Image (spheres, rainbow, N blue to C red):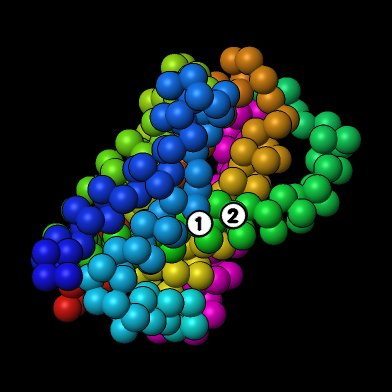
Amino acid sequence: MGFFSRHPIATFVALVFPLSWYSWLLGIADRIGSTGLNPLGPLAAAFITCWLVGGWSRIKQWLAQFVRFRCGLWPLFAAIAIPIVLSGAAVAANVALGAPTPTLEQLATWPNMIGQFVFILLFIGLGEETGWRGFLQPELQKRFHPFAAALVLSLIWAAWHAPLFRAEIGPALWAPFLIGIVAAAFVLGWLRNVSQSVLAPIICHAMVNTVGAGWAFQFFDGASLTRLWWINAGIWLGAGLLLAAVTGFRLGAPRDAQ
């Protein structure tokens, strides 16, 4: 445990990739046909790392983030509102630049998001954010300035998504996707810091996937869809940098962070 307690970040990173990529790696070896990415990998990596670093006491400290709120419930409402507002702005900008206006029939599909949100919350939001913002971000902020910690996390998080390239995200969308990862690291990192809870990032991540990829992005195709990716990435990056600037680039982290 002494080695792992001295190197918790390296331990987590060494675990999160194989625990998330195993089906993709087996697919490359032609043993199975899957090219997927297991979003529960970060959760499993965080749990194992906590055990290796400090046993049950460290695991309980990690789990306490689910019930801890430093500043009330408003970050949870922000976690819901931010993806709705930013996705709506991206769609409006796309239409203003020549994309077809979503039809009433398309807009009327919004009730489908309820079931999607619950599934994404419990599978992707919970699976990813308990690792990225629940474990890795606090550890990085012990060693780096909060803004630098968010950038480092975004690089690891972006690399983690590699199995999705080509399989689900074509080369034309790689750049806006990666910009969006960096932007999301700022926004989700801010939510984690101001609340000292992992629930806000979990909810926000699930809302992003539900309202954006699961609904608004379905309104467009072809060049209009590609343009929406770029607009969405730019809006999220602007929001992330604005949050960084107004917080003195600390992203809401307490002063006892670096």
For residue 233, above or below residue 39: above
Along the line of sight, the residue nearer the viewer: 234 or 254: 254
Q: Is residue 108 left or right of residue 97?
A: right
Q: Give above or below for 68 relative to 176.
A: below
For disc 2, the marked residue is 123
In the rendered image, the residue lying farthest to the front is 31
- Mark 2 burial class by Cα count in 10 Å: few <14, some 14-19, many 20+: some
Q: What range is drawn magenta here?
A: 70-97
Magenta portion: prevailing SS class: helix
Residue 247 appears anywhere in the view: no
- Which disc, if any, is residue 75? none
Q: Quadrant of the N terminus?
A: bottom left
Residue that label 1 marks: 127
Find out whether the residues at labels 1 and 2 contact each other: C-beta distance under 8 Å. Answer: yes
| Rendered location of residue 21, percent (x, y) | 42, 38
Q: How far apart in space, not on screen, are marks 1 and 2 (Cα)?
A: 6 Å
Q: Is residue 170 above or below residue 62?
A: above
Q: Residue at x 42, y 58 (%)?
A: 44
Residue kind at label 1, given as amino acid type = Gly
User: Which residue is depicted at the point 65% across and 48% down?
Assistant: 210
Q: Quadrant of residue 221?
A: top right
- Asked whether the viewer can see residue 11, the reply is yes
Reply yes or no: does residue 87 show up in magenta: yes
Q: Quadrant of the C terminus?
A: bottom left
What residue lies at 77% left-to-right and 54% top-to-bottom?
115
166 or 186: nearer the eye?
A: 166
Mark 1 lies on a secondary structure that is: helix
Measured as percent of width and height from the top left, residue 42 is found at 41, 54
In the image, what residue type sits under mark 2?
Phe
How far across and how far down the image is residue 190, in percent? Answer: 37, 63
Residue 23, above or below 11: above
Q: Quadrant of residue 254?
A: bottom left
